[in-house]
Image: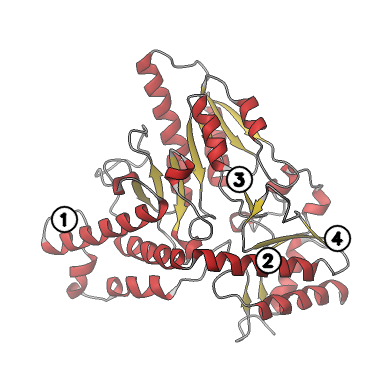
């Protein structure tokens, strides 16, 4: 079935999830043309009635998302343009503010340490590398072969000079879920602030900032069936953060810029819908994940990148990651696309790079093996029949070449 036909199957949810009806319906009033629409789409910072209406809608969205993530106060949530901006704000804003705070206390280290991991998204890795050029002592922890950061690795890297630790909740490529509560506890014991990129976790697995005891967490709406162009950063009350976007002082002067009210409303609607059926949907997707792993690993030359089901290790319900012998990702992606299946080779943000995934290389997977990586990610609208059809298509792509 050629791409674009009715039976085309989208299996790249980890790159972006389809917009759900709940979010589309919530945003619909904001997209009518003409001045009559200004009752719902005015600037949320204006004092007139349309502005107050927009402000109320924005704050209602903030309250709803804050409640879902377990924040104690709505104003702990800062709306951003997406998770990339949220991660940048977290890395730069928390690191610089922590140093300033220690200067005031007379305890600022000459080379403050930041700890992250080799398997983070580039939205964390690249800011961390820039901070290194600014004089921070940046340490990247290496994961296990299964893609996990151990408590021992973090404890060994922590020093009294550590000001910030940033470790993702769930990996976008292989799906490994880190033990965030335990890792955050070690960071706090050393006096460091703890941030987690929770972009892949929100609405898919239980995530509560209070239970996990994190100081900051990044989110993006489009990963949870919401619109693109809106995200958020949770920052715990009394955690110092330095604004990176300067202007009119919106978002309590922590992120200036006219807020995307329609996006925030859609974000909240998507999060609300996802969390209503979170447990049952996670169970359904886990069963589909395990079924697909079983199907595709029967194909000669196809191997699971990680082993799911080991005690003490958790993986995302809707991600399957494979290594295919003798093929490059790009070749397989295009062949599968021609057969009516959208998959990826890893993070969509690096989809045009010919280099193997930094995540896979950091796990100890050889360059040649990593070049044949495939990520199949699925969600609310995916059926077992689609995944069975994908397994058949993959087999045909490999053995009819």
Residue in front for this viewpoint, 396 or 245: 396
Q: In the drawing, what numbered circle is on residue 46?
A: 1
The percent coordinates of residue 194 (x first, y second) are 49, 35
Mark 3 near mark 4, Cβ–Cβ under 8 Å?
no
Marks 3 and 4, how far apart in space?
28 Å
Near mark 2 (Cα within 10 A), the count class, few <14, some 14-19 or many ≥20, is many
Near mark 4 (Cα within 10 A), the count class, few <14, some 14-19 or many ≥20, is some
Furthest toward the left, the residue is: 48
Mark 2 secondary-structure assignment: helix
Q: Earlier in the sequence, mark 3 or mark 2?
A: 3
Q: Earlier in the sequence, mark 4 or mark 2?
A: 2
Identify the residue position indicated by label 4 in the image. Answer: 325
Q: Can residue 342 be seen in this view?
A: yes
Give the number of the mark in front: 4 or 2: 2
Marks 3 and 2, how far apart in space?
19 Å
Q: Earlier in the sequence, mark 1 or mark 4?
A: 1
The percent coordinates of residue 38 (x first, y second) are 19, 69
Mark 1 secondary-structure assignment: loop
Q: Earlier in the sequence, mark 2 or mark 1?
A: 1
Q: Earlier in the sequence, mark 3 or mark 1?
A: 1
The residue at the point 77 percent across, 53 percent down is 370
Mark 3 secondary-structure assignment: loop
Above or below, 380 relative to 181: below
The quarter in which the N terminus is drawn is bottom right
Name the side, left or right, on which 274 lies relative to 396: left
Q: Earlier in the sequence, mark 3 or mark 4?
A: 3
Identify the residue position indicated by label 3 in the image. Answer: 178
The residue at the point 57 percent across, 31 percent down is 115
The percent coordinates of residue 345 (x first, y second) are 69, 60
The answer to which image quadrant residue 301 occupies is bottom right
Marks 3 and 1, how far apart in space?
42 Å
């Amino acid at each position: 079935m050629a791409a674009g036909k009715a039976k085309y199957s989208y299996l790249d949810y980890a790159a972006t999830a389809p917009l759900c009806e709940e979010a589309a319906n919530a945003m619909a009033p904001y997209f009518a043309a003409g001045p009559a629409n200004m009752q719902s789409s005015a600037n949320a910072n204006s004092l007139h009635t349309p502005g107050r209406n927009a402000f109320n809608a924005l704050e209602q969205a903030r309250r709803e998302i804050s409640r879902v993530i377990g924040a104690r106060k709505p104003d702990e949530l800062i709306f951003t343009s997406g998770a990339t901006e949220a991660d940048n704000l977290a890395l730069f804003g928390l690191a610089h503010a922590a140093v300033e705070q220690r200067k005031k206390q007379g305890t600022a280290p000459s080379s403050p340490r930041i700890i992250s991991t080799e398997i983070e998204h580039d939205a964390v890795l690249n800011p961390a590398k820039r901070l290194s050029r600014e004089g921070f002592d940046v340490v990247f922890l290496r994961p296990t072969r299964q893609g996990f950061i151990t408590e021992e690795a973090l404890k060994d890297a922590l020093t009294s000079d550590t000001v910030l630790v940033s470790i993702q909740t769930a990996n976008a490529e292989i799906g490994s879920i880190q033990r965030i509560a335990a890792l955050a506890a070690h960071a706090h014991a050393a006096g460091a602030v703890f941030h987690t990129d929770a972009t892949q976790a929100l609405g898919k697995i239980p995530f509560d900032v209070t239970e996990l005891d994190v100081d900051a967490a990044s989110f993006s709406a489009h990963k949870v069936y919401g619109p693109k162009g809106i995200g958020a950063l949770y920052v715990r009350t009394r955690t110092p953060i330095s604004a990176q976007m300067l202007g009119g002082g919106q978002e309590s002067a922590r992120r200036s810029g006219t807020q995307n009210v329609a996006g925030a409303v859609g974000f909240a609607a998507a999060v609300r819908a996802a969390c209503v059926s979170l447990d049952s949907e996670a169970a359904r997707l886990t069963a589909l994940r395990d079924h697909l792993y079983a199907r595709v690993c029967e194909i000669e030359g196809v191997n699971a990148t990680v082993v799911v089901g080991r005690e003490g290790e958790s993986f995302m319900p809707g991600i399957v990651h494979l290594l295919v012998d003798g093929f490059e990702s790009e070749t397989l992606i295009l062949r599968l696309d021609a057969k009516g299946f959208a998959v990826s080779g890893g993070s969509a943000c690096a989809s045009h790079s010919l280099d193997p995934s930094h995540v896979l290389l950091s796990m100890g997977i050889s360059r040649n093996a990593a070049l044949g990586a495939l990520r199949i990610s699925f969600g609310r609208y995916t059926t077992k029949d689609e995944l069975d059809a994908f397994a058949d298509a993959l087999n045909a792509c490999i053995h009819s070449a």
